[in-house]
Image (tube, grey):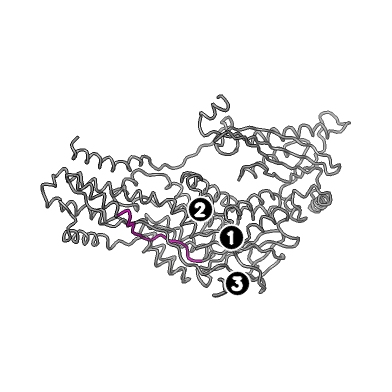
Amino acid sequence: MTLHRSPLLTALLLACLCLTAGCASHADRLHQFRSDFFAGNLDQATTEIDELIEKSKEDADVLKLDRAVVELVSGRPENAERLLREVRDRFDYLEQTSAAELAASMVTDDTAIAYAGEDHEKILILSLLALSNLMADGTDATAYSLQIAEKQRQLIEAAGGEEEHPELAERQVALGPYIHAALQEETFTNPDDVVRSRTMVVEWQPDFRDGKADLERAKYEAHSKPGHGVVYVFTLVGRGPTKEESLEVPTQAALLIADQIISHNASQSLPPTVAPIRVPKVVTRENRIQEVSVRVDDAAAGSTATIVDVGELARVHYEAKYPAVIGRAVARRVLKKSAVYTVKEHVNADASPVADVALTLAGIAWEATETPDTRCWGLLPDEIQVLRLELPAGPHKLTLQPADARGPFGQPASVGVNVRDGHNTYVLANFPDNRLVGQILTSEEVE
Amino acid sequence: MDRRVFLRDTVLLLSAAPLATLAGCRGHQKAHVLSKTDEDMVGSHTAGAETWKPLIDESVGKILGRQMEIILPAGHVEGALPVKKRICFVGVENKSSEEIGDFKEQIYQQIDTIISQSDAFAPISRRYVEAGLRQSRIRPDELFVPANQRMFAAAMEQLQQPFDYLLFATITSGTTRSNKDYQRDYMLTLELVNIQTGDFDKESANLRKGYHKSAVGKLKHYGT
């Protein structure tokens, strides 16, 4: 029997459409609080995230990451650090394979697997932990900065090593060694560590504008001139990547042909692959902000440079994992088709057209229920940027303003910082669009 | 074989294949406290406690032992303790090919602790050393320039922390490769500089480690 006759096929497709409609994906859930966050409605975004955490326990971990970003930009770095640490530990646990969840995912979809975070998210959790800690007391920032490098090493090894994925080794997040260098420089006792870390920054992020100058300075100069201190201005700019649903048409077409070949040769027909194979895809967004211009006491002092390209990082890591996503989707379809085939054999469906059609329909419907796993950290920035400034000790007013190729645009925002002789001061600001969202954080406020 | 049976079996086999890779359950990480007699874990890719601890014990022990003999005055009364010489331990410089990460601070603290337990030497608190370097804006590697040394000594005097010796620790490594296996020789060197006379004493400790991709590699290179 051939199923590819138009009335029956139309009926099957309609059934698929009915079954696939109605379930909100994580991407849908993200939309509202993301809009509120970028519009600067932080209280509203907090309420929405909290409600989602309450409603969908299985997404609680990833939603807590979004909550942590809101806490951080709202000026509560301690809360952000607590949440990020909690999720980091959960993801470490969930990284292990659960046979039960994987088996469940074979008969449902990837959302049956507890979300352990994408690789780029695991690295960025540690990056934001380091930044949050710098904005609080800074006591654990060295540990977090070392963990960033260690985690990347682990992830590259888990993906098959540098030989298999050289692109992962080439595109490592340089924020860890950058922060480590900054912290070591401040101790005055470890110039070798500073040089080593600055070298790593240059190797891992060759496009980082200030990398080579930082390295040269580290080789021959002390932290700062007498009577001066250093201010590190970190900025989170642009709207970061998210995961959205995408149709894997070539794989679906290949499976459909395979169905037909098997159905033609076998005694029973397989449910045809008419339900689209829906997979998540990383989507990056246009970011107008090229840099954030910094004025110190109303005089131009420089502009930030990109040290972490979050969108690029997400894309590279996801591409490395994409074959596995497709592999699981194909395995799932094969399993479902074989289950339907076995039942058809059991009930001798080839002798009963009604049973055959019913089982085929059920098979298609089963396949059509699959939802792509679009869970992701939705409030990431598109880039993390930094500027190092050496300033005379004492209080200063810093004014930050987004800028593109034509110069500064949008609303400037100011903060008072206190620079201590021979010490570092850290500043963090969030510019998802043309204005500051939240407040500018500083480790040394003007008293 | 019947075509029908063959196809059914093939389909079932294909469907079972993904599940065959699924074995495993999540487990919570556990830990236990090591007793003093437990051996240290041996780092599979880099040096760890198994390397640094013996290197520190050996090098610090040797240099302190020799210095005890040197600094005891000629008219020293048996049993009486000499006046402790003050050591300014500047830091540990890593010149090896490995990142030592959080071990660097531990190496510093272990050396500092052993010195503080010595009868002949008293280390200066690291916080003062950092403050002195910060105040004089001198990098540790610039302390061998006499003018810098004097400036640093003056800064320490101001902090009421005069010292007699500067101590530098340096980690180096040498790697010998044989295909995918390699041997790495680690060396911890201590240099003690008398700031009054400019004399210096130096002591090193070595440890060799073999890294293998398999047990066969170990057998091939070391016969064990």
Q: Amino acid at mark 1?
A: Met
> What is the total number of numbered labels drawn onto the structure image?
3
Q: Amino acid at mark 3?
A: Ser
Query: What kind of element bears circle 1?
Result: helix
Instruction: Choose the circle earlier in sequence order: 2 or 1.
Output: 2
Is residue A272 in view?
A: yes
Mark 3, residue position: A414
Q: Do discs 2 and 1 share a chain? A: yes
Query: What kind of element bears circle 2?
Result: helix
The crowd level at tag 2 (other Cα within 10 Å; few <14, some 14-19, many 20+) is many
Q: Quadrant of the N terminus of chain B?
A: top left
In depth, the one of B99 and A29 nearer the eye is B99
* Label 1: chain letter: A
- Residue B128 in the image: x percent, y percent? 74, 50
Which residue is located at x 56 percent, y 51 percent? A144
* Label 2: chain letter: A
Instruction: Choose the circle earlier in sequence order: 2 or 3.
Output: 2
Query: What kind of element bears circle 3?
Result: strand
Is residue A267 in the magenta section? no
Query: Residue A123 got which mark?
Result: 2
**Label 2 vs label 1, nearer the camera:** 2
Magenta-drawn segment: A238-252
Mark 1, residue position: A135
